[in-house]
Image (cartoon, helix red, strand yellow):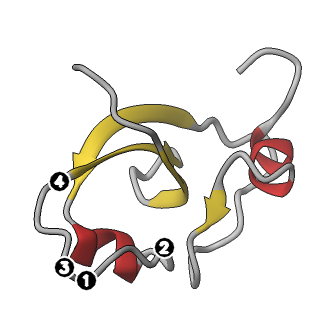
Amino acid sequence: MGASGPDELISNDDFAEVPYAPPLATGEFVRVVRTELRPAALARMGVYVDAAETDEIPADLLLGENWFPRGVRVLEAVDF
């Protein structure tokens, strides 16, 4: 993550905060996981995409130590 911490990642518009996610504990580690998500999963995280979209969408998830998503960033087309 470089010099920025998880709060800076979410607050600088890199990641959209996942609604209703509990706040990070002091000193809690986070990890970024690149994955592909269905539009319905993104909608549950507060990211709205075209409802006609049926393909999975590449995204980065900001996960807390408990593996619950804290932030999400939708990516342009990415080859895995």
| Label ID, residue 47 | 2
Tag 3 residue = 52
The amino acid type, in three-letter code, at marker 2 is: Val
The relative height of residue 47 versus residue 2 in the rendered view (above or below) is: below
Tag 1 residue = 51
Mark in front: 2 vs 3: 3
Which residue is depicted at the point 20% across and 69% down?
53
Marks 1/3 in contact by CB < 8 Å: the verdict is: yes
Side of 54 relative to 37 (left or right): left
Tag 4 residue = 56
**Mark-to-mark CA distance, 2 and 4:** 14 Å
Side of 14 relative to 55 (left or right): right
Q: x%, y% of residue 63?
A: 49, 47
Of helix, strand and loop, which one carries label 1? loop
- Outermost residue, left direction? 54
| Mark 3 closeness class: few <14, some 14–19, many ≥20 residues within 10 Å | few
**Mark-to-mark CA distance, 4 and 3:** 12 Å
Which residue is depicted at the point 50% across and 79% down?
46
Side of 42 relative to 45 (left or right): left
Which residue is depicted at the point 38% across and 73% down?
49
